[in-house]
Image (spheres, helix red, strand yellow):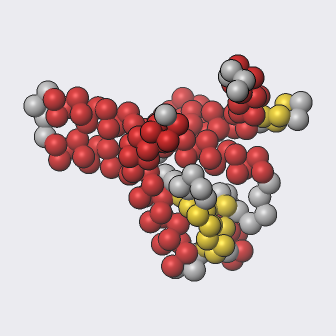
Amino acid sequence: MKKFKAAILICLSLPSRVIGLLYVLLAFAFMLAHRLEFEDNGVVTAEWRLWFASKVGFSVTSGHGIIYMPSVDMSIHEHEHVHVRQCEDACALSFLIGVILIACGGNWIISLIMWMTAPAQLLLNYFTGWLRFGDSYTGAEHERSAYAQTDVVDGESWLERHIDEQDSSLPKK
């Protein structure tokens, strides 16, 4: 069942995977990033080159692609992977809305465009964050969520505590 669910997630998050791969490979091809790595979970990572890192100033996630600042700590890795999961959620929601639109007699091309642009739709969070709090980055709910999930308290992040709780509730084999 676990492999079946993983396969569904891969299919639903296809736009995020394609966008992430293109993003990291383009940065790599234009010599902006190096240390290319393909993770088991489908995430493609790289690291900004030092000369470009000084211009960018932060790690960037686009879909299933992450380019880190040089020498970042583990909490940033966890933070950026929260964004990957947020993109998966956005793709699943956009896919479902697209299916509903088609079922209601809508245009399948518009539905496909909606699904393919799901990761980019998260950029609107910066605009609404600016409207709410005056700061687009710290006001964006997806950033607040990622920081909250990876903020370390008593040696563990919220995510680690949640996974530990989830694991302890599973039946022992």
**Residue located at (88% from left, 35% from top):** 155
**Residue 162 in sight here:** no
Looking at the image, residue 144 lies above or below residue 12: above
Tally the marks.
0
Residue extending farthest left: 105
Q: Is residue 118 left or right of residue 31?
A: left
Q: Is residue 99 left or right of residue 33?
A: left
**Residue 161 % position (x, y):** 77, 28
| Quarter of the rendering containing residue 73 | bottom right
**Residue 154 % position (x, y):** 89, 30
Residue extending farthest front: 173
In the image, 8 versus 15, the foreground residue is 8
**Residue 13 % position (x, y):** 42, 46
Residue extending farthest right: 154
The quarter of the image holding the C terminus is top right
**Residue 29 in sight here:** yes
Q: Is residue 21 left or right of residue 154?
A: left
**Residue located at (24% from left, 46% from top):** 112
Looking at the image, residue 39 lies above or below residue 26: above
**Residue located at (61% from left, 71% from top):** 36
**Residue located at (16% from left, 29% from top):** 103
